[in-house]
């Protein structure tokens, strides 16, 4: 008998579910979002007023809710969405959008001020991308510096909320900074309309953002849709912190 380490267990589970999904997809195509049973959304002020009870009835299993950006911006819909999602029974977590012109410690302290501790919440998310369209901070920073800033925020998020944070990223930032590192953290990848595994260096992703123009009952505006990598029973384990 032998015991797998947590990272080895995650890898084994990822491989197992990938084999199942690939078998369902068939030999002629890559897996598609509809091959996965657990889907959720991520939202911010731009989704406007949300009817969370209708969202839940529409088959949304989880929601990531924007809370903060940088060291002083709070999404004006955060508290409303945070409280209403929980009241409707939608598992939800908060995400922070990283601003590369602000020290990491200031950003994570701001996140902690805004996002209340809730042991039933999903793990916090650190959203890391280059902000090329930003009017105030379009720059990139060296990879070593970006990694150091990320570690400060990830480690403090875990200390404050008691759960291993999730890293959200796109392919550019992944290749520039994350590749070959941060493998102990669940990763949430943006890969619109294309299966992400080969694009992301065969990293074992946990969440896949597959469209930015999804439609969900209870939300009038377009919304990002996301798939969880595993089965329904694996999702329950993730919620319970045993995956």
Image (cartoon, rainbow, N blue to C red):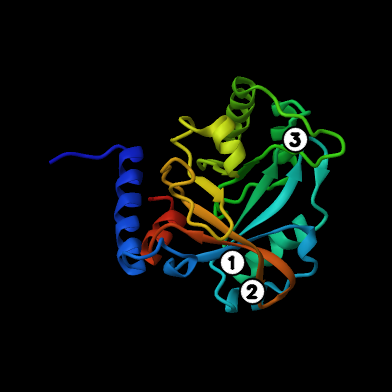
Mark 2, residue position: 55
| Residue 91: percent from left, percent from top | 57, 62
Nearer the camera: disc 1 or disc 2: 2
Nearer the camera: disc 1 or disc 3: 3
Mark 3, residue position: 99
Q: CA–CA distance between discs 1 and 2?
A: 8 Å
Tell me what residue is drawn at x 76 percent, y 38 percent: 132
Judging from the image, what secondary structure is the residue with disc 2 in? helix
Judging from the image, what secondary structure is the residue with disc 3 in? loop
Q: Is residue 139 left or right of residue 194?
A: right
10 Å crowding of disc 1: few (<14), some (14-19), many (20+): many
Verify CB contact (< 8 Å) between mark 1 and mark 2: yes
Q: Earlier in the sequence, mark 3 or mark 2?
A: 2
| Residue 178: percent from left, percent from top | 54, 33
Tell me what residue is drawn at x 74 percent, y 40 percent: 113
Tell me what residue is drawn at x 72 percent, y 62 percent: 81
Q: Among all residues in the image, which is located at the extreme front?
A: 28
| Residue 130: percent from left, percent from top | 70, 37
10 Å crowding of disc 3: few (<14), some (14-19), many (20+): many
Disc ID at residue 90: 1
Whether 44 is drawn above or below 126: the answer is below
Tell me what residue is drawn at x 81 percent, y 33 percent: 137
Q: Considering depth in this image, is 4 or 17 the residue closer to the camera?
A: 17
């Amino acid at each position: 008998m032998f015991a797998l380490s947590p990272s080895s267990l995650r890898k084994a589970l990822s491989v197992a579910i990938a084999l199942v999904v690939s078998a369902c997809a068939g030999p002629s195509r890559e897996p598609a979002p509809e091959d996965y049973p657990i889907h959720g959304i991520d939202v911010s002020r731009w989704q406007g007023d949300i009817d969370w009870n209708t969202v839940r009835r529409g088959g949304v299993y989880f929601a990531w809710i924007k809370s903060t950006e940088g060291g002083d911006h709070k999404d004006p819909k955060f508290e409303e969405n945070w409280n209403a999602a929980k009241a409707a029974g939608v598992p939800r977590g908060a995400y922070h959008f990283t601003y590369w012109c602000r020290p990491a410690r200031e950003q994570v302290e701001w996140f902690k001020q805004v996002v209340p501790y809730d042991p039933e919440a999903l793990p916090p998310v650190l959203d890391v991308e280059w902000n090329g369209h930003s009017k105030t901070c379009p720059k990139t920073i060296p990879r070593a510096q970006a990694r150091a800033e990320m570690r400060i925020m990830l480690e403090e998020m875990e200390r404050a909320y008691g759960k291993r944070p999730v890293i959200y990223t796109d392919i550019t930032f992944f290749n520039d900074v994350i590749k070959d590192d941060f493998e102990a953290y669940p990763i949430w990848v943006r890969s619109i309309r294309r299966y992400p595994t080969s694009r992301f260096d065969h990293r074992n992703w946990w969440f896949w953002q597959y469209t930015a123009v999804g439609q969900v009952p209870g939300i009038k505006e377009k919304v990002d849709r996301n798939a969880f990598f595993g089965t329904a029973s694996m999702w329950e384990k993730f919620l319970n912190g045993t995956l």
